[in-house]
Each structure stands twice: as C-alpha cells, then as structure tokens.
Amino acid sequence: MKSMKALIVLAHPNIETSRVNKRWREKLAQHTDIAEIHELYREYPDWQIDVEREQHLLESHELIVLQFPLYWYSYPPLLKKWLDDVFTYGWAYGSAGRKLVGKKFGIAVSIGDKEENYTRTGNIGFTVDEVLTPFKATAGHVGATPLPYFALFGASFQATDEDIAQSANAYIEYVRHWKATDVSVVQI
C-alpha cells in the first residue's frame, strides 16, 4: 500500500550538532500527517544497510526527499553508500528495474556558504543546480521526476535562529506542495 506521506531520507552524520537539519527534523516531526522521517545515520550506525527494507520504504512512497548538508559540493558518505546499495540493477534501473518510475524526488539541502557564491561568477563558480546535477541525473535514470531543490544558504556562519526557523516553515510548505502536486502536468 502506498503511503500518503512523503518519505524524508535524512542523512546528517552528527544531527545533534546541526542547527539547520536538526531544526528541519524537529519541524517535520510536528507534521506526522505529511512526512515520515527516516534517518540513515541513526538506522545504520554500522553502515550495514538493509537493502530490502530500504527498497520497500521507497516503493511505498510517492514523494521522496533527500535531506542533507552539502559536503564538499556533494552529499554525506552514508547517503552515497545508501544510493549505491539500494538503487540496484533490476530494481531501480535496467530492463526490469522500474520500481522508482513515476516517483517524485526532492532535495532539501543546507548549504554553508552564501547564495551569491553559487553563481558562475561567484567563488564557487557553479550554481546549486549544477552542483546537484548527479541527483537529477540519478532520478532521471531511474524514471523518477527530479523536483526543484529546497535550500538554506549561509548555514555555517550567516543564518540566524530566525532564518532557520523561517526555513523550517518553508520546508514544510515545500513538502506539502510537492506531495499534492501532480508532476505530470507541471513543467520542472
């Protein structure tokens, strides 16, 4: 049976020291009607991923949001391992791998640097959309629809407690919106 909730796959190696991802998790936990939180680092401290369980979780949700802090323009290592282990040939892709076709894949990312640095002329030299290209490519490869990302910039040094609280409220709206939106009629 398909869950009407979004599946939030949270990957933060030290959530208790996080200001942003921890606050987002707390806010999501207040909205159990819209989201199920699945914390990879809590579930798999030994990094031994239960592939069958994870595949079942993904199959039972229509909206999957990967939530994580941006790590060196990528994702935390356990999230990478999770993708490598769970998105298997014959299940996620290949001639018989169609279990993720039609799913909606979002990304909620905390970014330490300032937004203006994520431009072609900024210090980073790339946009966030460009940095997140591997996620969009993965979603497309498995037949899912990649959604626009949700982000809070300046998480490392610039974001105030008020900024983080506002972003947590906006994150709930992001999840609500994409949970209710039929992406087959939306141009992304």
Image (cartoon, grey):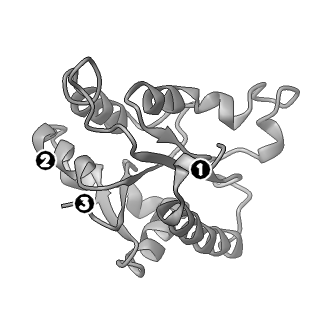
- The type of residue carrying mark 1 is Val
Relative depth, front residue between 24 and 112: 24
Q: Which residue is mark 2?
A: 53
Query: Residue 167, percent across and down?
Result: 64, 67
The first of marks 3 and 2 along the sequence is 3
The vertical placement of 113 against 165, above or below, is above
Other-residue count near label 3 (Cα within 10 Å), few / some / many at <14 / 14–19 / ≥20? few
The vertical placement of 96 against 21, above or below, is above
Query: Residue 122, percent across and down?
Result: 84, 31
Which callout, 3 or 2, points to the residue nearer the camera? 3
Which callout, 2 or 1, points to the residue nearer the camera? 1
Q: Which residue is mark 1?
A: 185
In this image, 43 relative to 82: left or right? left
| Mark number displayed over residue 28 | none
Q: Is residue 67 visible?
A: yes
Other-residue count near label 1 (Cα within 10 Å), few / some / many at <14 / 14–19 / ≥20? few
Query: Residue 172, percent across and down?
Result: 54, 71
Query: Residue 105, percent across and down?
Result: 46, 45
- The type of residue carrying mark 3 is Lys
Quarter of the picture containing the C terminus is top right
The vertical placement of 123 against 17, above or below, is above
- The type of residue carrying mark 2 is Arg
Q: Which residue is mark 3?
A: 2
